[in-house]
Image (cartoon, rainbow, N blue to C red):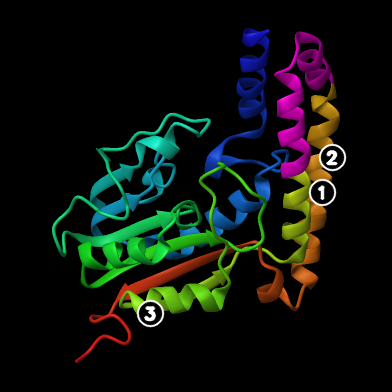
Amino acid sequence: MRKLASLMPRLYGWICGQELSANLLHFQFLPSHYFRRHLKADAPRLQGRLLDVGCGNQPYRPHLPQVTRYVGLDYPVTQALQDFQARPEVYGDARRLPFADGSFDAVLCSQVLEHVNQPETVLQEISRVLKPGGTGILSVPFIYNVHVGPYDFFRYSPFGLQELLGRAGLQVETLRYQGGVGTAVVQLIHNWAFSGLARLSRRSALAAVLAGLLLPLLLVWCALNNLAALAVDRLDIDTPRFSPNLWVVFRKTGDPAGAPA
């Protein structure tokens, strides 16, 4: 049963792609689609020595060839809860980064801030290790289901995120909304359906076989849903209010907002 259950994710990944390569058949295609688009637009801003905070298996690294030194950091406790093998150069706590002040020209922190219980401290640490004038990219969820529990603490509106960045001396240069109401609704439905299917397939060999038989229908269902979500997103004139994810390019400006002169 274990072999059968482990075969399904490999087969799914072979058909649908993984991480940033997820195709239209994948239940996570929508976030992957927007991440690829915005990474292509903003990756050239990251230069020199880069720190990837919460790097996981470093899916962004191949898209940043201009970076001269790539340092991935991950936290061993939460990393153990993921369904992939992390590949950090350094294990550490983002609330106490093990680097000297001004050690990096650029910082990347993607889908991490919701998983730390002191996000303001993490942003202050990012500001500390970033050189003055240095650039960073940060992505966080706004409308999304609970995941990687119990290490899932916060969701961020664009206003709250700008406030936290400003307190850390980090100025927002670009704020991108990753999808609208179409993506928000479809992604929640997909996550609900596939997380339930994954739990079911682990219960018995029969359930795993049933999941395998349903897979072709689910792939077609996902593709149709993904196309519909993209169409609704294009019609959604109120996207900022319902975007499931935020993508921010920021720059270190100097003293944190409100700090004494």
Residue displayed at 31% across by 87% down: 258
In the displayed structure image, the side of residue 260 where residue 230 appears, left or right:
right
Please name the amino acid that badge 3 sits on. Gly
Specify which label sits upstream in the sequence, 2 or 3. 3
Residue extending farthest to the left is: 100
Q: Position of residue 49 (x, y in %)?
A: 21, 55
Mark number for residue 166? 3
Q: Are marks 1 and 2 in contact (CB under 8 Å)?
A: yes
Mark 3 lies on a secondary structure that is helix
Residue under label 1, please give it. Answer: 225
Q: What's the magenta region? A: 191-213
Residue 171 in view of the camera: no
Q: Are marks 3 and 1 in contact (CB under 8 Å)?
A: no
Q: Position of residue 135 (x, y in %)?
A: 31, 68
Q: CA distance from mark 2 to mark 3?
A: 42 Å
Residue displayed at 74% across by 17% down: 203
Task: Determine which quarter of the picture holds residue 102.
Answer: bottom left
Quadrant location of the C terminus in the rendered image = bottom left
Residue under label 2, please give it. Answer: 221
